[in-house]
Amino acid sequence: MALGYAENFSVDYYEGGYTALTTKLDGKRFLLVPEKGKTPDNLEKDVVVLKRPVKDIYLVASAVMDSFCELDGLSAIAFSGQKAEGWYIDGAKEAMEAGDILYAGKYNKPDYELIVSKGCSLAIENRMISHSPEVTEKLEDFGIPVMIEYSSYEPHPLGRVEWVKFFGALLGKETEAEEIFTEQEEILDKVTSGKKTDKTVAFFFVTSNGLVQVRQSDDYIPKMIELAGGAYVFDGLGEPDTKRATVNIQVEEFYSGAKEADFLIYNSAIDGGVSDVEELLDKCALLADFKAVKEGNVWCTTNDMYQQSLSIGYLMEDMYHMLRGEKENMHYLFRLT
């Protein structure tokens, strides 16, 4: 499969309708065998065989649900690591409320009895599972292979989106995946074709203990700001080798670095966000001195953004319009007043 941005997976096709998926960071290999096909002889021991159609999936990686919905692949999922009320994706919430997808426990506490008795065929996890290796071991002991998606390790924002092709291949929906990705790629072409504004943006969250959480400078959010024509206000912040997305800093350091930023974007992912500037100032009164607050250029992300893995193109488009003052009706950003 030809890939434009993603670096952490590959898809290879073989005669007879066989497809091989590889997640490169852990080297895991999965062979998709056609419904009426035979498992090849003399396969290497580490190759996991999955029979088509792949179904009865235990989906723990919440960022993947969006891809399954857009690919019309919800019927392949039987179990969720998120409760119905935790989903902002309508299709997932409705499927769970209807009993078509069952809650089977969080990544570190799966309901083994449920998923084994109901015939789970595959667990799709995110990198958090690395903190609970005993879970992976036990799932595999029960004969349930574990697939880890590493979209968050992609250096380019559209590399994250391109993982829809990986799951398209898993479901045999490559054509649909290509169409979804092409739409996002067209948005990238649009936002990068405009002149850069060089207006500065701070993307942040105020923690419960009074610190300010910001993105490391090499994270995908600062990259999106740059692609949209802006400049992330913090340069050289964080330690790239840690692969962490965020870093907590003191309010004074945030004040020093972001007071003159042209735009502030508040990250709603953890606390549900804020509804107006007054609520934001209740969290951190010092923000009243910030240029963006005084000029009315404070924005907030919507709550559903982080479950929408295919939101990246639209969020870049939102940033593009925000930086140019061209549009108020956004997909994933709204202005605080």
Image (spheres, rainbow, N blue to C red):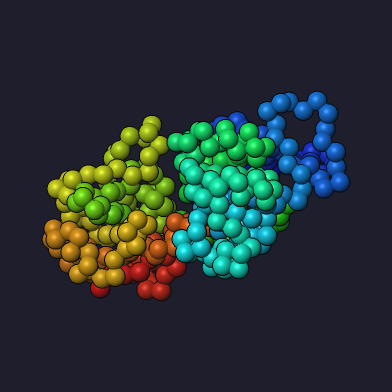
Looking at the rendering, in which quadrant would you find the C terminus?
Answer: bottom left
Q: Quadrant of the N terminus?
A: top right
| Residue 265 visible in the picture | no
* Residue 167 locus on image (x, y percent): 64, 50
Q: Quadrant of residue 261?
A: bottom left
Give how far across and how far down residue 279 sits, in percent: 22, 67
Where is residue 228, by image quadrant?
bottom left
Looking at the image, residue 210 lies above or below residue 145 = below
* Picture residue at 55% right of the left edge, 47% below the top: 111
Looking at the image, is 207 positioned above or below residue 45? Answer: below
Residue drawn 27% across the image and 60% down it? 263
Residue 45 image point, x, y percent: 71, 26
Q: Quadrant of residue 315?
A: bottom left
Q: Position of residue 123 (x, y in %)?
A: 60, 44
Which of 57 and 113 lies nearest the eye of the viewer? 113
Of 323 and 273, the residue lying toward us: 273
Q: How many marks?
A: 0
Asked if one can make out residue 331 in the rendered structure from this viewpoint, the answer is: yes
Q: Is residue 18 left or right of residue 110?
A: right
Residue at image position (13%, 58%) is: 286
Q: Locate residue 158 relative to residue 337 in the image: left or right.
A: right
Instruction: Kindly identify the residue that appears in the image at 49 percent across and 48 percent down.
Output: 106
